[in-house]
Amino acid sequence: MGCRVQFISSPLPHLAPSTSSRLAESTHARTGEGTSVTTMAALPSEQFDVIVVGAGIMGSCAAHAVASRGARVLLLERFDLLHHRGSSHGESRTIRATYPQPHYPPLVRLSRRLWDEAQRDAGYSVLTPTPHVDLGPKDDPAFVAAVANGGATELAAGEGGARPKWAEVFRVPEGWTMASSELGGVMKATKAVAMFQALAVKMGAIVRDRAEVVDVARKQGEGTIVVRTSSGEEFHGTKCIITIGAWTSKLVKSVTGTDFPVQPLHVLICYWKVKPGHENELTTEAGFPTFASYGDPYIYSTPSMEYPGLIKIARHGGPPCDPDSRDWAIGSGEGGLVDPVARWIDEVMPGMVDTAGGPVLRQPCMYSMTPDEDFVIDFLGEEEFGMDVVVGAGFSGHGFKMGPAVGKILAEMALDGEARTTAEAGVELRHFRIGRFEGNLMGNARSF
């Protein structure tokens, strides 16, 4: 039997403001396997320990982490819950520990444990384990560093029976090699966000959608943070966590007057048809891995899973965009996100995937990119906010897998003023400070 949890939605127009802050509606929805959700209305007069702005994967994980500490937390989302207008929706994300930067593998490994704990608490799975394989030029410094940092094992050519069967799918270019690691997997993205929201509410969190935050400010003469919405409502909290992805720069600019180094990018998720006779070879059931290919372009993939007979293979990155005026028609510039992928497939996976006519499904998404592709996890600072407002942003197309660890870090920063989890994971937060861009617009960027 699924658990029964309580969410809140936009206030019912016929309810007077003086009514109790926990007024149940009779509406029910579904957020995941075995989870029944009851929407509720809450009034702005309540005082929260932490207000989390943005209910994507990072905000939902942060709200869950705050609620697990027994603190009162409000999670606000400007759109409908589980919407498709940001960066946390969709059928799949990958998890891997192979990173050129040494500060990511420890976070991935910590997150992998936290994913398991959350699935255990929820009673259902959102992550399907698979192997992971990286392909790249033998002399590419980024590839070499990723393999070393992730503990991957090179699959030498000509090993015969020692090589996994799926390795024969790839025709590795001259001068390239591939390396396999056991820490891989596919996460059901939207289902995962719903899971963390449901777990947060089960622990006492309040979740509210259709509440666009337009201002965050400190109440004059008090330690309270006031969060205002476009409808004129005010919510009061001791601390605030901002996790609004592609909209971060706009809100931070409005609140502090300073530029925030996060650029939204338009990206395209492509699903290609597997050629007849090979449909079962590229599936999770067959043990086919998630994979990444280094070089230009950087290609990534998940096994055939969500759409039978199709496999997701896409290019990392895309052109800049405005999250409030996107080209949903996926028109101009699409070739730069599709054609290089088709050429890569024909060269590296010949005979396996049909590229004639392009991908069968094309799904737009967004990255929130920093100049160095490292995260921003820091206090907003400024004289007004000090350590009372925390920002998590710029997850640059590779942060979803680390959502549980990032959420825990953000919660600890808000509640404790420091993040013990980073010490547990062996990671220093200095890599993610906003200040790294002061006098150096490229931050941590380096040539491997």
Image (spheres, helix red, strand yellow):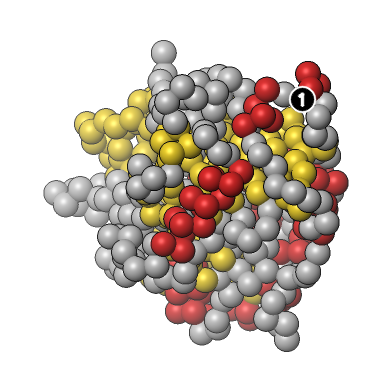
Q: Residue furthest left?
A: 14
Residue 43 appears in the figure: no
Observer-nearest of 149 and 393: 149
Q: Secondary structure at mark 1?
A: loop
Q: Residue at x 54, y 28 (%)?
A: 282
Quarter holding the C terminus is bottom right
Give left or right: position of 76 versus 433. Answer: left
Task: Name the residue tied to disc 1.
Answer: 163
Q: Position of residue 291 (x, y in %)?
A: 63, 40
Residue 99's spot in the image, x, y percent?
74, 51
The residue depicted at 75 percent of the width and 41 percent of the height is 178
Mark 1 neighbour density, 10 Å: few (under 14) some (14–19) many (20 or more): few
Which of 305/350 is in front?
Answer: 350
Q: Is residue 375 above or below residue 276?
A: below
Indicate the amino acid at tag 1.
Arg
> Percent x, y for residue 301?
56, 42
- Nearer to me, 174 or 137: 174
Q: Quadrant of residue 437?
A: bottom right
Q: Is residue 250 above or below residue 233?
A: below
**Residue 141 position within the rendered picture, expressed as x and y whole percent measured from the top left:** 82, 59
State the residue at coordinates (43%, 44%): 355
| Residue 269 visible in this rendered orientation of the protein | yes
Looking at the rendering, in which quadrant would you find the N terminus? top left
Tell me which residue sits at (49%, 30%) in the image.
Answer: 304
Count of all numbered marks drawn on residues in the image:
1
Where residue 268 sits, quadrant-wise, is bottom left
Indicate the quadrant where residue 410 lies: bottom right
348 relative to 414, above or below: above
| Image position of 18 with respect to 304: above or below | below
